Amino acid sequence: MPSIRIILSENPTEVNDNIAITVICTDDESDSVDLAYDFGDGNSGSTPCSTLPGESVTLFHTYSTPGTYEFEVFIVDGHGGSAESQIAEDVIANNPPEIQLSTLLSDVYLVGSETAFDAYCYDNESDIVILTVNFGDGNTDTIP
C-alpha cells in the first residue's frame, strides 16, 4: 500500500518566492509510483516518484498572489493501490516598511549647526528594518 509525506521548505512564504516542496513516496511492495500534484493555483503536473528508501521528489513553485493554497498530491502504484495527501501553503505579501521622520528642534538650520530627529520604522511582517539616513550633504548614517 503506498503512502505520501509532504515537506514544505517554508510556510508561510512570500509572493514571488520560489519554494521547494519535497514529496516522499513509500510503498510496501517497493513499486514505482506515478505522482500527480496540484499547487492549488491552477498549476498541476505529474512525475514518477521512487519509493526506494532515502529518495524523494522535490518540486519548485512560485505563487504570484497572496492567499492560502491547498497543495495536493496523489499516487498510484502498479497494483492499483493509491494514496493522497494535502497541505496548506500560506502566501503573504511582503509590504514595504513604514517610516515616519520628525525633527526635534526646528525646520530651519544654520550651516554647521547640529540637529536632532526621530525616526520611527515599522514592518507589518516583522522583518528586520535597517534605516539608512542621507543627510543631503554627502553624509549618510545606517541605523540597525
Image (cartoon, helix red, strand yellow):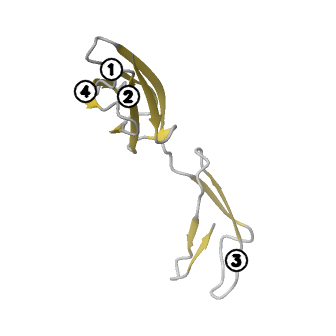
Q: Which residue is mark 4?
A: 46
Amino acid type of the residue tagged 3 in the rendering: Thr
Q: Earlier in the sequence, mark 1 or mark 2?
A: 2
In front: 100, or 122? 122
Q: Position of residue 77 (x, y in %)?
A: 29, 18
Amino acid type of the residue tagged 2 in the rendering: Cys
Q: Earlier in the sequence, mark 2 or mark 4?
A: 2
When asked about the image quadrant of residue 40, the answer is top left
In front: 31, or 56? 31
Label 1 and label 2: CA atoms lie apart by 8 Å
Q: Position of residue 66 (x, y in %)?
A: 44, 33
Q: Which residue is mark 1?
A: 75
Crowd class of label 3 (few under 14; some 14 to 19; many from 20; radius 10 Å): few
- Contact between marks 4 and 3 (CB within 8 A): the answer is no
Label 3 and label 2: CA atoms lie apart by 64 Å
Label 2 and label 4: CA atoms lie apart by 13 Å
Q: Which residue is mark 2?
A: 25
